[in-house]
Amino acid sequence: MTSFILRRLGSGLVLIVLVTAITFFLTFGAGIPVAQNILGPTASADQIATLNAQLGIDRPILEQYASWVLGVFRGDLGTSYFTSEPVAQALASRLPVTLSIVLVACVITLAVSVLLGVASAARGGWLDSLLQGIATISYVFPAIVLGIVMVYVFAIVLEWVPAIGFVPLQESFGGWFASIVLPAVLLSIGGVASLAAQIRGSMIDELNRDYVRSLRSRGLSERSILLKHALRNAASPGLTTFSLLFITMFGASLFVEKIFALPGFGTYGFTSTIQGDLPAMLGVSLFSVAMVVVVNLAVDLANGWLNPKVRVS
Amino acid sequence: MVRMTRWVTAAVAMAAAASLAACAGGGSASTGTGDASSTLRLSIAAPPSNFSIGNWSGGDSTLAMSVYDSLIHREVDGSLNGGLAESWEYDESATNLTLHLREGVSFSNGEPLDAAAVVANVEVLRAGSSTAQNLASVSSVAAPDDSTVVIGLSEPDAAIVPLLSNTNGLIGAPSVLTAESSQLAPVGSGPYTLNEQKTVAGAKYVLDKNADFYDAADYPFETVEIQVIQDPTAVQNAMKAGQLDSAGLSSEDLIAQFPESEFTTGQNKPSTVGALWLVDREGTIVPALKDERVRRAINLAFDRTAIAEGLGSGYLNASEQIVSPTGGAWDDELNGAYDYDVDQAKQLLAEAGYADGFDVTMPSTVVSTKFESAIGQALADIGVTVTWESVPFQDFYSKVFGGSYGMFFMMNGLGGSDALDVNASLSGVFNPYLSTTPELESLLAAANLSQDEEAFAPVNEYLVDQAWFAPLFYITSLYVVSNDVEYTSPVVGNLTVQPWSPNN
C-alpha cells in the first residue's frame, strides 16, 4: 500500500513539473505584452522597459523559469504582475471560496444522486421521470442562464440570499451558507444528472444479480438489501464518476464565481490567463495538477476499500 | 464489523472537519461591513496593480486617491483647488512651478508631510513606470524651505498642474516610498486609510475615514467598500439586491430595471473619445494617409449622428474633435467641419490620386467589434476597402508599435484638461511613429506657455483642419445610484469618492 501511494505521488510530481513547464514556455512564447497591458495605451517604450525590468520579465527565459522553480522549493510562488500580491497568498485567500462551493455542491450532488438513483432503480415510475427531467434541464439550459434566473428569484425578488459576495465561515456560519448555497446548487445540477443516472444504472444491474435473489429468499428487508449490499457493490463506478465530477466542478466553478462575483480560484485562474500573469498562471497550474493527483489517489484507495478485489497488495 | 464502522465514522468525521476548515479562511468579502448609512459601497472591474507611488496603473484611481493625497485637488465641477499645495504659481518663463505646501499635515504613520517629503516623492514619480513619461518635462525639484517646493521644467508644460491633481501628483510616506510593502499597504495622508484586516487584495478593499484629514467634511462616509466585480450583470444584480450604492450601466435599455422609487439614473460627463486614429501620417504602411485630403475624405465618410444614435444605446455623442466638450479648446463649430458628404469625400480622394480608393487592414479587437460594420460600410462607400484582422487585445499594442497598422479604431480616455487630452492623443499607441509638424510644434509651444483656459483651441483647430484623426463620438456613460446616496457626475471621473454623499 505504502509503495503504491509513493509511486502515485512520485508520478504526480513529474506531472506537476511537466505541466508547469509547458505552461511557462507556452505563455512565454505567446509574447503577451504584460507591461503594456498594465500601463495602458499611452505608455512609452521607456516606461514599458522600466516596468519589464521591475517585474523581471526582461531576463532570459531559462533564468526566469529557474528562478520560479527555486522559489517553489522555498514556498515562494512569485508575485502577480497585475496585483502585486504574492501568488501563494492569493491562492490561500481564494481557495476557501471555491472549496466552499465545490464541497457543498459535492454533498448536494452525492445526497440527491444517491437518493434519486437508488429510488428510481428500486421503484421507477415518477422518480425515474424526475431524474430524466433533471437531466434534461441540465443539458438544455446553460448554467449561466439558470444562474441568472436563480439570482433574480432568490436574491433580488425574495431577498433570501445575497446576489454577490462571499462571507468566510469564521465570520458567520449563516452568512457563509447564504453566500454559497445558490452557487453550490447551480454547480450541482449537472452533477446530479450524470451521477444519479450512473447510480441508477449500476443499481439496476446489482438488483438483477443472483445474490440479491438469495438475500431476498433469506428474508432480508428490501431496505437492507438496497443500502447495505447492492449500493456498496454499485458504488465503485459511481465513485469514479464522482471523483471526475469533483474535478470538473472545480473547473466549472469559474462560471458560478463570475455570476455571483465570488473571489475564487476559478476567476483568479481565468483572469491570470487572459492577462498573461505568468506567476499566477503557474501557481494555478501547480495547484490544479496536485489536486487532480490527490483526488485520483484518494478515489483509488476508496475503491480498494469498497471492493477488495481491486486492492493492490 | 462494529470496529470497522467506528473507524469509518471517525474517518468521515475527520474528513468533514477538514473540509469545513478548508472552507474557512479567505478574507471577508461580505458587504455591509459598517453601518449602512455611513458606508459607501462601490465596485471596480479590475483590481489595482500596485499602490506604490509612481506605479499605480488602471483606469480607476479611486482607491489610490483615497489613501494618498495629491498636491492639487480636482473638484467635482472640474476646477482645480489647493490640496497638499495650498497655492501655486509659475514664474514668467513658465518653467518654474512654485508650490506652497499646507502646514501641519502628517502621514498615517506619523511622519511629517513637508517639502523634503514632496521632493522625495517627485523624484520617485519622475522615475515611476506609470508616471515617468507624463512628468518628462520635469527637470528638477527643490525645497527652498520646509513648506515650499519648486518644480523646474525643461520647457513650458500646461499639463503639469492637471497632472498633479491625479495619480501623477500623489504623495506617500518617504520611509516606504520604494519599499515592497507599499505595493499592497500604502502609507499616505489621504481622506481614508486602507483597512488591511478587512481588505482582500484583488477582491475587496475597505477604507476607513481619516479623521485627521484637513478636508474631512468633504468626505461624509465613515467607510468605503470597493469590490472587484468583473461581470457587468453581477454588478447590476448587486445594485438591485441593495449590495452596491452606485454603478455604471451599459445601455439605456437597462434603466427600466431600476425603478425611480429606489434608484436614480442619469448620464455622466464626457469620459472617452472614440475615433479612427490615422497614425501613419508619414505614409509608411498606408501611403494614402500621408495626404491630408485622404484623411479629410475619411472624416467626411461618416454620418456620426447616425452612428451615435444607432450604436449608442444612449451614451454616444457625435464628435469631430478629440478634446472634451467641457474644456476650453472645444469649438461647437468644428463639429460641422466634416459633415457627412460621400460625394465630397470621393472628390477629395480623386484629387489625391485615389479615385479608385485603396485597401487598408485594421485590427479587430474587443473594442472595435461593435463598430466594425458601420466603419467598414462608411469607408467602402467612398472606395476604401477595409480588411479586419482579428487581434487579441493583449497583442494590440505590440502590433501597432510594430508597424502592422496605419490606422485603427480605439477609445481614449478624457483627462479633464485640454493639455492632457491633446498630449494623450499625440503619444503612446495613438502616435506610435511620433509624427509632428513644425506648425503643430509651434502651436503646442504657445499653448503650453499660456495659462488661458482656451490655450489649446488653436491646437484643436489645427488637428481638425489637418484631419490628424477621424473622431466619431465621445461617450457620456450611464449611471445608476441608490436613492440612499446623492451623486453628482464629476467632470473627471474615477478620482475620489467626493461625487457621492449620503441622501439624508
Image (tube, grey):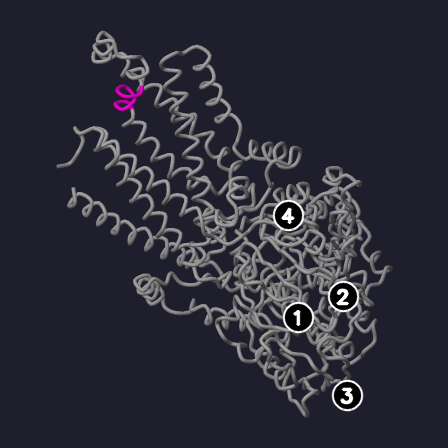
Q: Are marks 4 and 2 on the same chain?
A: yes
Residue B140 placement (x, y as % from top left)? 63, 87
Q: Residue at x 31, y 30 (%)?
A: A239
Residue B174 located left or right of residue A124: right
Q: Are marks 2 and 1 on the same chain?
A: yes
| Cα distance in 3D space between marks 4 and 3 | 53 Å
The stretch in magenta equals: A227-234
The residue beneath circle 4 is: B385
Q: Nearer the viewer, mark 1 or mark 3?
A: 1
| Letter of the chain that mark 1 sits on in the rendering | B
Task: Give A142 or B498, whichever is nearer the viewer.
Answer: B498
Kind of residue at badge 1: Gly
Kind of residue at badge 4: Thr
Q: Which mark is residue B190?
A: 1
Residue A112 placement (x, y as % from top left)? 43, 26
Of the numbered discs 2 and 1, the one sitting upstream in the chain is 1
The answer to whether the residue labelled 4 contacts the one labelled 3, judged by CB atoms less than 8 Å apart, is no
Q: Nearer the viewer, mark 4 or mark 3?
A: 3
The residue beneath circle 2 is: B218
| Cα distance in 3D space between marks 1 and 3 | 29 Å
| Letter of the chain that mark 3 sits on in the rendering | B
Of the numbered discs 2 and 3, the one sitting upstream in the chain is 3
Of the numbered discs 4 and 3, the one sitting upstream in the chain is 3
Q: Which mark is residue B93?
A: none
